[in-house]
């Protein structure tokens, strides 16, 4: 799933490439992806792209003064920028990966695509980003929150710190991959309880959040959209590295699987050397 650094980089890429271009038209290929019906997609035609912004893990393309195309890429969505499109007529609704296409006046534009069968990519045409339910519920941005705000938000929700850190209503922008990376950098178990963390642990988690996300944003900015996924993978230390040695201590990176996701961690760095079993069965290290 694209998280804060990738969405920030996509917004930066669109600011560099698309701002100042006029929209020729918007074509919707996956009707279910467009969650609003007013304004209609035709209202975008002729408007100039004036900005691109990030709200948590939401990407927003500003059109003119008062219209926003807000997108949540979900788990398998992505933005593909095209210098030109294949010849032929408009997109037709179907079962392909393209959900929505934005054509610009110079012949370039971008496709919003989604792989797999679980189609959860969501696009909204709104006059105010706060009209998007997910945006309205966002907590403070994880990269911008100061220590006091960070600590207050973290301790406002009792739960395993991995889940609290990825709760967008608590802090916005962190998902499954970067939460693994942040917890590894902070040397914390993913199952430590958020309201039982010491001041020192919260400070370490805050520092790790800023460092991990900041480094990822720095690596990603300036990259082409097509290169961002590879850049993300190259910077990971534990996430998606099950069975490989931890680059810090050399211990084997382990995994805990759930119904539709998994997490990775280093026992030596994070849990006192004790492997974690299934969360429903183990006495978890805190």
Image: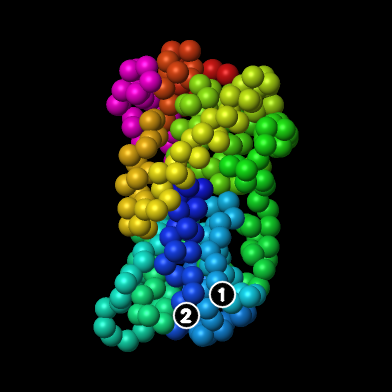
Give the magenta part as a residue range.
240-263
Closer-to-camera residue (177/147): 147
Which quadrant would the C terminus be assigned to in this image? Answer: top right
123 or 7, which is in the foreground? 7
Q: Do the residues labelled 1 and 2 touch (CB within 8 Å)?
A: yes
The mark found on residue 23 in the picture is: 2
- Identify which residue is drawn at 51% across, 48% down: 4
Q: Quadrant of residue 154?
A: top right
Residue 248 place in picture, x, y as percent: 38, 20
Closer-to-camera residue (189/51): 51
Q: Position of residue 170 (x, y in %)?
A: 66, 42
Q: Nearer the viewer, residue 208 or 218?
A: 218
For the image, the number of numbered tags is 2
Mark pair 1, 2: CA separation: 8 Å
Residue that label 1 marks:
63
* Residue 248 vertical placement versus 139 (above, below): above
Looking at the image, residue 116 sits to the left or right of residue 39; the answer is left
Measuring from the top left, give residue 56's x and y in whole percent.
58, 51
Q: Where is residue 263 in the image (x, y as percent from the top left)?
A: 44, 33
**Mark drawn on residue 84:** none
- Tell me the crowding category of disc 2: few under 14, some 14 to 19, or many 20 or more residues within 10 angstroms, Cα based: many
Magenta-drawn stretch contains 258 = yes
* Residue 217 part of the magenta segment: no
- Give the residue drawn at x 41%, y 22%: 266
Q: Is residue 227 above or below residue 89?
A: above
Disc 1 crowd, CA 10 A, few/some/many (<14, 14-19, 20+) = many
Q: Is residue 261 left or right of 64 when viewed as pictured? A: left
């Amino acid at each position: 799933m694209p998280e804060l650094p990738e969405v920030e980089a996509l917004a930066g890429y669109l600011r560099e490439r698309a701002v100042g271009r006029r929209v020729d038209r918007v074509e919707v290929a996956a009707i279910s992806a467009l969650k609003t019906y007013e304004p209609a997609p035709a209202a975008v035609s002729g408007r100039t792209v004036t900005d691109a912004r990030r709200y948590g893990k939401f990407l927003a393309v500003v059109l003119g003064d008062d219209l926003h195309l807000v997108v949540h890429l979900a788990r398998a969505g992505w933005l593909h920028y095209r210098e030109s499109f294949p010849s032929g007529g408009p997109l037709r609704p179907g079962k392909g990966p393209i959900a929505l296409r934005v054509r610009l006046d110079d012949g370039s534009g971008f496709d919003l695509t989604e792989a797999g069968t679980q189609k959860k990519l969501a696009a909204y045409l709104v006059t105010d980003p706060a009209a998007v339910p997910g945006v309205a519920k966002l907590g403070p941005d994880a990269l911008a929150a100061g220590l006091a705000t960070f600590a207050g938000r973290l301790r406002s929700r009792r739960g395993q710190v991995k889940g609290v850190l990825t709760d967008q209503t608590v802090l916005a922008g962190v998902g499954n991959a970067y939460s693994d990376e942040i917890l590894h950098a902070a040397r914390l178990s993913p199952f430590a309880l958020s309201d039982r963390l010491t001041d020192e642990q919260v400070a370490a988690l805050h520092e790790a959040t800023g460092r991990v996300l900041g480094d990822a944003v720095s690596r990603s900015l300036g990259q082409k959209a097509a290169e961002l996924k590879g850049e993300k993978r190259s910077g990971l230390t534990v996430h998606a590295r099950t069975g490989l040695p931890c680059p810090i201590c050399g211990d084997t990176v382990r995994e805990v699987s759930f119904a539709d996701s998994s997490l990775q961690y280093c026992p030596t760095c994070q849990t006192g050397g004790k492997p974690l079993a299934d969360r429903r069965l183990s006495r978890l290290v805190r």
